[in-house]
Amino acid sequence: MTETVNGVVFAILAFASIGGAIGMLTTRNVMHAAFWLLEVMVAIGGLFLLLSAEYLAVVHVLVYAGAVSVMMLFVIMLSLRRREDAVRPVDVSIGGAVLAILFGSIVYIAIAQYGDRVAEMPAEAPDTAALGELLFTRWALPFEVASLVLLVAVVGAVWWSREVDR
Amino acid sequence: MAYVALIPLLPALAFAVLAPLSRAVRNRMRWVGVAGVAGSLALSFAAFAAVWPGGDEGEATYRASASIASVGGVDLALGILLDPVSAVMLIVITVVAVCVQVYSLDYMRHEERIGWYYAVLSLFTAAMLALVLADNFLMLYMSWEVMGLCSYLLIGFWHEREEPRKASQKAFLTTRVGDVGFAIGLAVMYATTGSFAFDVVLGSAAGWAPGVATAVALLLLFGAMGKSAQVPLHVWLPDAMAGPTPASALIHAATMVAAGVYLVARALPIFEASGIALTVTMVIGATTALVGGLLALVQFDLKKVLAYSTISQLGYMFVAIGAGGAVAGMFHLVTHAFFKSLLFLGAGVIIHALHTQDMREMGGLGRRMPWTAATFGAGALALAGIAPFSGFWSKDEILYAVWKGHHYVVFALALAAAFVTAFYVARLWFRVFMGAPRTLAAFAGHADTDHGDEDHGGHDGGHDESAADRRGETRWPMVLLGVITAGIGFSAPFFSEFLGHAGHWPDPMIASVSMGVALAGLGAGWWVYGRRAGAVDTEAIKARFRPAYSALDAKIYFDAAYERLAIRPFIRVTESLAVFDRIVVDGVVNGAAVLWRTATDLSWGFDRRVIDGVVNGTARLSRSAGVALRRLQSGRVQTYQRYVLGALVLLMLLIVVKGA
Amino acid sequence: MLPLLTMIVFLPLLGAVVTALLPKSRPDLPRQVALGVTLADLALVAILVARFDVSGGFQFMERASWVPEAGIQYLMAVDGISLPLLFLSALLMPIAVIASWKIDDRPAFYFAMLQLLAVGMNGVFVALDFVLFYVFWELVLVPMYFMIALWGGPRREYAAIKFFLYTLFGSVFMLVGILALYLHPAGGTFDMIALADSGLPAGFQWWVFAAFFLGFAVKVPVFPFHTWLPDAHVEAPTAGSVLLAGILLKMGTYGFVRVSLPILPEASASWAPFVALLGVISIVYGAAVAFAQTDLKKLVAYSSVSHMGFVMLGIAAGTAEGLNGAVAIMFAHGVITGMLFLLVGMVYERTRTRTIAEVSGLSKQAPVAAGMLAFASFASLGLPGLAGFPGEFLSLVGAWRSELIAPGYVIVAAIGVLLAAAYMLWMVQRVVLGTQSGTVEGITDLTRVEIAILVPLVVITIGMGVYWSSLLRYVDPAVGALLASMGAM
Amino acid sequence: MIEVGPAAFMGLAAVLFTLGLYGAVARKSAVMVLMSLELMAVSVNLNVVALSRFVTPTEMTGQVFAIFTMVVSAAEIGLGLALVLAIYRQTRSIELTTMDSLKG
């Protein structure tokens, strides 16, 4: 038996994520935008589950929905002097829209051409243990490099966000 | 025989030692230059002895070569070819060079940059020696150009003044006009034979297509005309007299200017293969001989008279080669080298003594400067072609060759040139050495004091206004050259045999005609300038022949024509090209930038800022386009983001379309 | 054996990173690090030259898979054509560093950029995979942009952007050419060596040549794509000008020799008359415009246009002489023009002006500077015995020999030699000779350090001018191999 | 039950990416731009994981890739927000339009 993705679940999650993204872009309140992003992240975590990437789903929700969104909120709050500052007009850029639509339609053409080469979903889906195995054997070096990247990012973030006497 | 290679290397080494030194040290080390040339002189005599008794034309006594590059399977080399012709040239060059260097020790001793002067003189000597020893055209061309550089540096020695500066530039550029022809000639030669070596090129010349041979010959001749100051490329040589007089003696009288003659003589097989090229050579030579002589008639500058005379005599040599008397041409080259350098050295003494080059301010120097007068006289008689001085012999041989070749028109031209030559020699002699002193300087001679040291071009330091001979380093080179000038003529038949041709004593008929013409010229000169002051009103003669005189006075309009037809149009063209470059070529670029900016504004957004941008951008089309280029760099992250994304979209489009 | 080429290319990258991280409190450290790194790089290149086998074709090859899915390789090697240019680049780097010794505005950034530039330049000359080649090619733009835009003259932003966009514009076409080669069924690889014997159809070659031509011609630059050059030169700091003229221009002509000739031989032949025509126009036009310049740097810049025209002529000729000549000019021009720009920079530092009319009589006040300037000028105008001559002469001879080029072109090009003499002497006459102008009064002569960086260039100029083989022994076999691979077109 | 193939995931990812792209270009608030960038990164992740699941399920290359992408974007967002804060301290504004000190 080949595994399948539940179409209904997918439809719900897709709707949720797209809706969240649109919400994020159309809201006038930055705070609300951050919450919309959070919603998108959760939906995508669900999609990862559908793809039997359990570990990834968990990490994703932890990192994006947890850490990143919270950080966003902090920064927004730190950079707002008054509550009203959070509300600001939605910037509309026709140039940006044209660009995005152009981009989207090109990608659409590409998907239309090649997207259906693999229709069936293979049955086998290794579990998290297998991922861990791979991560610490075949991908060990990149993994270590990634941790280094994080370290550098932490140092850099601390460096930049320190109070400078002027 | 490897020491032959040292002949050009010694002076080159002297240059290499002198050039990097500081000015003060270099000035003290000038003996290095003399030593280098003296060494070359000794080695040249050894080489000459090795070649002696010569005779076999084209037979090399010694050859050696070192490859400097291998290109596409062909070796390009610096090589030495010692044969009778080069042996003779070695002697001539080193003797004159030593004389000039010794003479300069005294003559130039108060110059601030004497060390540099010696360095360049050494480099020049090295290049000239390399040129006559070269066994291929490439090396010949390279030394040829290095000589051009030295000539430039020495003409412009007193570059603080406008005149030498301009003259040096003119000399370099005019000769380089010829060199362009030379270089193309080399390219044609190489394309034809795949080699630059004398053996290969000259050996095969007879078998070339006549068109190719003519082309190569004429191109080489063009190069020779530049270097040897033949009409119409002669204009640089009179101006080159702005340089120090000893340098003029060596470079612009004895050696470098004769290199063109040497080149044509060397490349003779090509000229012979062409035939027409020989005739062209002869016609140009004859024209130059006459034009140079005529121009010498109206000069008042002592050195310029000699310069035009050099041009004229070089023309003679070309006539000889063109008429088939290459040996006669070479012999005239040799004799001319000695007597003309002698004349220049004499002129140097006079100029130093009087601080003027204007013959109208001279006169009566014969009594004040007996040594100078005597040696100068020998040179003058040789130049005029009076037996037994050397010029007579060589000129006679040339006339003989022309006559034998049945070139009667050229013969007549050559005789006319000979008459003119004798006439201006007389004019010069009587104006400078005879008559009464015309200036205070020419008057006040006290022979025993220390002498004025500054050359005309130098500085007006406290010098001693006396007209007198000089001694020591200045005098003996002149005496030596004088003796050679007086005696070398008798070697004429042996010279021919040494070069591998039948030698002969002068033909009585030709000799008497040439003597007669020369004496007539001298006599006419005496009639006009010598009999007694004011016997003939030169102004009246001038008035009588007003058009001819003014043409000569304006140097037959050569300079004016170049100025008006070449130089000024060239400058105008360059200036308008520069404007064209700035406004049109660059304008297209900037215009494209403006358009691009406008286009990006149009497509990337209509928010307020950008709409403003379009309006402004359009307005800016008429304003400085540079602003538009700057506007591309808005400094805003998102503008750049758009550029990047736009490019990305384009790239993706490309891939998708290509894939479909 | 050590991966020598990788070390040569990426050592400056390491240097750049280290330099960028140096503490601000020690502003003298960056230049010392940069000097050390560039000297070490020069030493590595010297080892390379010493170990180079003259008749060995491509050597020191390093081949590794990079992106196997797209057939992109990490492929580097040198042959007799790239070796001189690599050497030139390594030689000019320490000189550029010393010439920038007095930079005190953001020195760490400056010297990091300088070394990053070295990475790109070295990389272009050794890369044999198109993707690698393209990466290095574009890498060069960034540091040069910053050098002009941040440390340049009064109109630096304009010049920098113009330089950047113009050359980027050209290289986009080059990218199109690269992709076309990759996507064509007969090509299908980024490997330059493999592409050289892929036998592409002539009609296709013609179009690809056109794309590459635009990319390279802007970089060379050939008339009419040259207008970025004078602006960039005038505004760039001295080291920038030296490297721009010394190396960056060579990338364009090197591209022709490395890419267009071997990969597109038929198209090269059919394009040759056009390339030669543009070359000849560049020669004469560059010289004529140089003559009318009032700014020393602009004069040298336009003289570069003229000299690069000779390179194009030699390349178009497609003969052994022509190609030898082309490479010889590339090398010689790098040395000589480097010298000229250094001297102009040194004079500018003292007189604060580059206007020719305002500087005169240098020889009295600063004889060494004047002598060097005159020397470089004479070398530049192609005096035999100095480095400028062999290349010009060989490219003329080669062009005459070529069946692809009409003799008329060669004659016009030879007149360009005359014009070179005209504008150079004109400059020497005004700047070096004559009586002192007020700007020159009281200036000091060259310091020992300044002389020290000029001396190697002087020595090379004389050495190569007298003994052509010192360069051509590397070039000629490679040219022979190249011509053989092109099937004696 | 509706079969959902890779094209659906790719389409979803494309839509999210396009939305993010628009936001990154259009919004003037630095925080909003960063959020849009996150959205783009996440959509790429989704794409990679989906393709890996369908094409090479056993090797899980896509998941590994996604982890690395996450690392990088986490690092990026950390640094980006730190930068925003730093800029805010200097200029009292997080509007990108006011940051043009690089203007030529």
Image: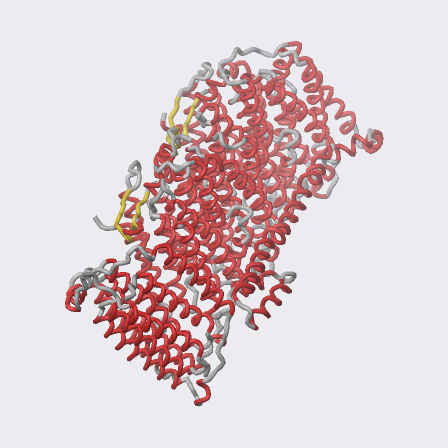
Q: In the rendered image of this protein, does residue C68 appear above or below residue C197? A: below
Q: Position of residue C5 (x, y in %)?
A: 29, 50
Query: Position of B511 compared to B501: left or right?
Result: right
Q: Residue at x 74, y 38 (%)?
A: B360
Total marks in image: 0
Find the residue positioned furthest to the bottom.
Answer: A82
Q: In the rendered image of this protein, does residue B387 appear above or below residue C429? A: above
Q: Position of residue B332 (x, y in %)?
A: 58, 22
Q: Position of residue D87 (x, y in %)?
A: 42, 79
C383 or B466, nearer to the observer: C383
B626 or B400, nearer to the observer: B626
Residue A72 found in image quarter: bottom left
Residue B469 found in image quarter: top right
Q: How is the model colour-coded? A: secondary structure
Q: In the rendered image of this protein, does residue C56 appear above or below residue A125? A: above
Quadrant into which the N terminus of chain B falls: top left
Find the residue positioned furthest to the front.
Answer: D1
Q: In the rendered image of this protein, does residue A154 appear above or below residue B69? A: below
Q: Residue at x 42, y 21 (%)?
A: B49
B74 or B360, nearer to the observer: B74
Q: Position of residue B447 (x, y in %)?
A: 63, 39
